[in-house]
Image (cartoon, rainbow, N blue to C red):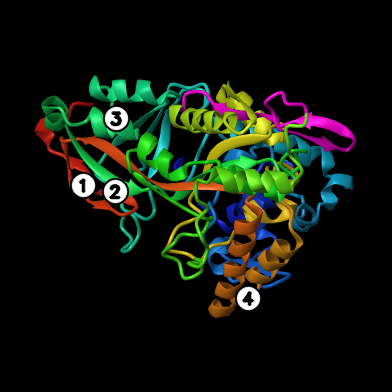
C-alpha cells in the first residue's frame, strides 16, 4: 500500500513508466536508462510485462528497481490515463489528440513533484514547508502501513519515529547549528573536521565517521565555447590545475585525485592512464600548439578565432554558499593569471547558477557527480557522456561530442560479455583522458558528526545505515 492506504497495483507501475517516458516531464537524466523499452502491458492488478526493442545488460536492475508513484496522487484528474505509453515512448503524442492533456500533466508534475510527495516506503512526508528550494525543513514520520516491515530481507522501518531534515543552504551556518545543538547529524567541511571538531566539548557531544563520497568533483569546460573547443586547451587547463595541492590545502588530505569517472575498484577502471601533473610548461606548450600567444604584449594570451582576435578571458561560475568550490576557482584563477589568462570568478545563487548551466551559458564550472562511480554495480556512463544527452536539458551540459565514445556507450549497453564490456570501457577512459572534457579533480572522503545519544551506529565504507539507529528513552529530547 501507499502511505495513504491506497493499494499499489500494476496500474501504478504503468503510470510510473509513463512518467519516465513522457518528454513533457523534466527527467532526461532518468529517461535514457529506459530507452530500450518499447511497450508496457498490464495484465490484471498485479502483473506487468515490459517489451524491449533492444537488449540492455542492466535491464533487470533498472526495470526491477524504478520508483513506483501513486497514479491517483500524481495525476488525480487522469490526464494521461488514456494516453498509450507507446506514444510517450516514440514522441508521437506531441502531434496527437492527447497533446494538450500530456502538456498539462507535464506542467503540473514538474511544478508539484518537489512540493508534494507520496510513496510506499518506510517513511512518509508529514510536514513540508513549501519545497527544497524555499522551505525551512522537511519532516518525515514512520509509515506504519509500510508493506515491507515484516518481510524478511527488506529494509525495516527503523527505530526512529520522526526525522526532521533542516534546509540550510550555507555550510558554515549548518556547522554553527550543529555546535549550537540544533542539529543531531551533519557532514563537515574538511576545515571544520580538522580544526573545529576536536575540542573537549565537541567530543563529549558528538561522534564522528568518515566515508568515501559516492562520486567525484570536477571542473567542466564548455566544449562548445570558442576557447574550449580545442582539446589542447582543455588539457592545458588540467596541467595548470594543482590538484594535489588543492587536496592538501583545501581538503586537508581528505580526498584522492581521480583521472576519470570510473571507480578505481571496478574491473572496468583503466590503471594505465598517466596522471596529469601540475606542469605550467606542458600547459603553455599545448596552448602554443593551439595557436595562443600574446601578440600585442598586453599580458594576455590571444588568438584569431573566425577572423576575430580573442583574448584568453573567460568566466568561471560557482554557486554561492559553497566555499570549497569558490576556493577551487580562485586558486585556478591565480595560477592562470601567471600564464596570461584572465579567469573571472563569478558567484551566483543556486537557482540562477543552475539556470546558467542548464542553458549552457557558461565557459567553466565546478560541480560534482554522485552515485555513478560506485563499486556495487557495473557503470553506465551514457547519461553523462553520450552526445544525445547534450540536448533537451540532458546531463551532458558541457556539450562533449565524440563519435567513438557514442559508439562505445551504445554497443556497451547491449553487450552481455563482461570481458568485452571491460575492454570497451578502458578505451572509453582513454578517450576521455585524451580529450579532457572535464578536469577530473578528486573523490572526497566526507566526515560526519552525529550525536552521542544515538546507539546502534555502524559506519560502513559508504556511510551509516540510519535504520539501525536508536536512542535510549532517557536520552530522547524530541516528542
**Residue 318: percent from left, percent from top:** 56, 29
Name the element at disc 1. Answer: loop
Which circle, 1 or 4, is nearer the viewer? 4
> Between disc 2 and disc 4, whose residue precedes?
4
- Residue 264 counted in the magenta span: no
Q: In this view, does 159 lie above or below 39?
A: above
**Residue underneath mark 4:** 415
**N-term mark: 3 or 2:** 3
Q: Is residue 319 visible?
A: yes
> Observer-nearest residue: 11 or 464?
464
Q: In the image, is 15 to the left or to the right of 262?
A: right
Using the image, determine if residue 58 lies above or below residue 247: below
Circle nearer the N terminus (3, 1): 3
Please tell me the numbered disc located at residue 457. Answer: 1
Q: Position of residue 69 (x, y in %)?
A: 56, 47
Among numbered discs 2 and 1, the one appearing first in the sequence: 1
Front label number (3 vs 4): 3
Disc 4 crowd, CA 10 A, few/some/many (<14, 14-19, 20+): some
Q: Tell me, for residue 192, which label it has, or none.
A: 3
Residue 307 shown in magenta: yes
Q: Do the residues labelled 2 and 1 touch (CB within 8 Å)?
A: yes
Label annotation for residue 464: 2
* Labelled pair 3, 1 in contact (Cβ < 8 Å): no
The alpha-carbon separation of the residues under discs 3 and 1 comes to 22 Å
Tell me which numbered mark, 3 or 4, is placed earlier along the sequence: 3
Occupied quadrant, residue 186: top left
Q: Give the range drawn in magenta.
A: 296-322
Marks 1 & 4, CB-CB < 8 Å contact: no
Residue at 64%, 70% (x, y): give it.
412
Q: Quadrant of residue 344?
A: top right
State the separation of the CA atoms marked 3 and 4: 46 Å
Residue at 46 percent across and 40 percent down: it is 4
Amino acid at each position: 500500500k501507499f502511505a495513504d492506504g491506497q493499494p499499489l497495483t500494476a496500474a501504478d507501475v504503468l503510470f510510473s513508466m509513463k512518467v519516465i517516458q513522457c518528454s513533457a516531464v523534466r527527467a532526461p537524466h532518468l529517461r535514457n536508462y529506459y530507452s530500450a523499452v518499447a511497450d508496457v502491458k498490464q495484465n490484471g492488478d498485479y502483473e506487468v510485462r515490459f517489451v524491449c526493442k533492444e537488449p540492455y545488460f542492466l535491464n533487470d536492475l533498472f526495470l526491477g528497481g524504478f520508483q513506483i508513484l501513486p497514479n491517483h496522487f500524481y495525476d488525480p484528474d487522469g490526464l494521461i490515463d488514456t494516453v498509450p505509453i507507446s506514444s510517450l515512448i516514440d514522441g508521437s503524442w506531441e502531434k496527437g489528440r492527447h497533446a494538450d492533456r500530456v502538456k498539462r500533466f507535464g506542467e503540473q508534475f514538474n511544478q508539484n513533484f518537489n512540493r508534494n510527495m507520496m510513496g510506499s516506503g518506510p517513511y512518509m512526508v508529514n510536514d513540508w514547508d513549501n519545497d527544497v528550494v524555499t522551505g525551512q525543513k522537511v519532516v518525515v514520520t514512520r509509515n506504519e502501513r509500510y508493506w515491507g516491515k515484516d518481510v524478511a530481507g527488506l529494509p525495516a522501518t527503523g527505530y526512529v519515529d520522526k526525522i526532521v531534515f533542516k534546509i540550510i543552504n550555507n555550510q558554515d551556518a549548518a556547522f554553527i547549528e550543529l555546535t549550537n545543538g540544533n542539529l543531531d547529524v551533519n557532514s563537515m567541511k574538511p576545515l571544520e573536521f580538522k580544526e573545529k571538531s576536536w575540542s573537549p566539548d565537541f567530543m563529549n557531544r558528538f561522534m564522528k565517521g568518515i566515508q568515501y563520497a559516492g562520486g567525484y568533483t570536477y571542473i567542466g569546460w564548455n566544449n562548445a565555447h570558442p576557447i574550449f573547443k580545442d582539446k589542447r586547451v582543455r588539457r592545458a587547463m588540467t596541467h595548470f590545475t594543482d590538484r594535489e595541492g588543492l587536496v592538501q590545502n583545501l581538503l586537508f588530505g581528505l580526498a584522492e585525485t581521480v583521472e576519470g569517472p570510473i571507480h578505481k575498484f571496478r574491473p572496468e577502471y583503466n590503471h594505465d592512464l598517466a596522471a596529469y601533473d601540475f606542469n605550467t610548461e606542458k600547459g603553455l606548450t599545448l596552448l602554443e600548439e593551439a595557436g595562443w600567444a600574446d601578440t600585442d604584449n598586453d599580458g594576455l594570451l590571444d588568438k584569431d578565432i573566425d577572423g576575430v582576435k580573442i583574448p584568453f578571458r573567460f568566466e568561471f561560475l560557482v554557486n554561492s554558499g559553497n566555499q570549497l568550490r569558490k576556493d577551487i576557482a580562485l586558486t585556478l584563477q591565480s595560477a592562470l593569471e601567471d600564464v596570461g589568462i584572465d579567469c573571472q570568478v563569478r558567484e551566483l545563487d543556486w537557482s540562477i547558477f543552475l539556470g546558467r548551466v542548464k542553458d549552457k551559458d557558461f565557459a567553466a564550472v565546478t560541480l560534482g557527480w554522485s552515485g555513478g562511480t560506485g563499486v556495487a554495480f557495473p557503470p553506465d556512463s551514457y547519461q553523462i557522456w553520450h552526445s544525445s544527452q547534450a540536448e533537451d536539458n540532458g546531463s551532458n551540459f558541457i556539450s562533449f561530442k565524440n563519435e567513438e565514445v557514442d559508439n562505445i556507450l551504445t554497443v556497451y549497453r547491449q553487450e552481455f560479455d563482461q570481458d568485452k564490456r571491460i575492454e570497451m570501457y578502458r578505451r572509453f577512459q582513454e578517450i576521455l583522458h585524451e580529450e579532457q572534457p572535464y578536469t577530473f579533480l578528486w573523490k572526497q572522503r566526507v566526515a560526519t558528526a552525529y550525536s552521542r545519544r544515538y546507539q546502534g551506529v555502524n559506519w560502513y565504507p559508504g556511510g551509516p545505515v540510519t535504520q539501525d539507529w536508536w536512542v535510549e528513552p532517557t536520552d530522547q529530547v524530541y516528542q
